Image (tube, rainbow, N blue to C red):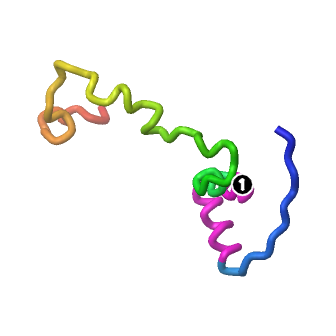
């Protein structure tokens, strides 16, 4: 992929918010802006699939396990050991 540089003016508050969000997500500010452009449908990669889209065909496929696995404390007795 060939890239270009884009310069734009944003407010100090926007810059601070962008910097903080990128720091929190441990990605560059440029990566965060590219992600936002894809989410807004601006880039050709807008058809990038979400995590849900990737695994949705697997949801509900597991049969035979306990139906209350995530809510019954009995199943969590040795969790973390």
* Residue 6 x, y percent position in the rendering: 84, 61
Q: Residue at x 74, y 76 (%)?
A: 10
What range of the chain is rendered magenta? 14-33
Q: Indicate whether 19 appears above or below 25.
A: below
Q: Residues within 10 Å of mark 1 (few under 14, many from 20)?
A: some
Give the residue pinned by disc 1: 28
Q: Quadrant of the C terminus?
A: top left
Instruction: Name the image quarter holding residue 63.
Output: top left
- Looking at the picture, tell me which residue is in the foreground, 12 or 49: 49
* Residue 52 x, y percent position in the rendering: 42, 38
* Residue 27 x, y percent position in the rendering: 67, 52
Which SS does the magenta portion mostly show? helix
Residue 63 in sight here: yes
Residue 27 in sight here: no
How many labels sit on residues?
1
In the picture as drawn, the residue positioned furthest to the bottom comes out as: 12
Q: Quadrant of the N terminus?
A: top right
Q: Residue at x 47, y 38 (%)?
A: 51
Q: Residue at x 66, y 42 (%)?
A: 45
* Residue 68 x, y percent position in the rendering: 14, 35
Q: Indicate whether 36 appears above or below 3.
A: below
Q: Residue at x 26, y 35 (%)?
A: 79
Q: Indicate whether 17 appears above or below 50.
A: below
Q: Is residue 40 left or right of residue 65?
A: right
Instruction: Name the image quarter holding residue 70.
Output: top left
Residue 32 painted magenta = yes
């Amino acid at each position: 992929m060939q890239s270009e540089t884009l310069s734009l003016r944003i407010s100090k508050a926007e810059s601070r918010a962008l910097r903080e969000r990128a720091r929190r997500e441990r990605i560059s500010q440029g990566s965060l802006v590219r992600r936002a452009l894809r989410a807004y449908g601006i880039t050709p990669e807008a058809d990038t699939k979400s995590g849900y889209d990737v695994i949705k065909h697997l949801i509900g496929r597991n049969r035979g396990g306990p139906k209350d696995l995530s809510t019954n404390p009995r199943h969590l007795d040795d969790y973390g050991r």
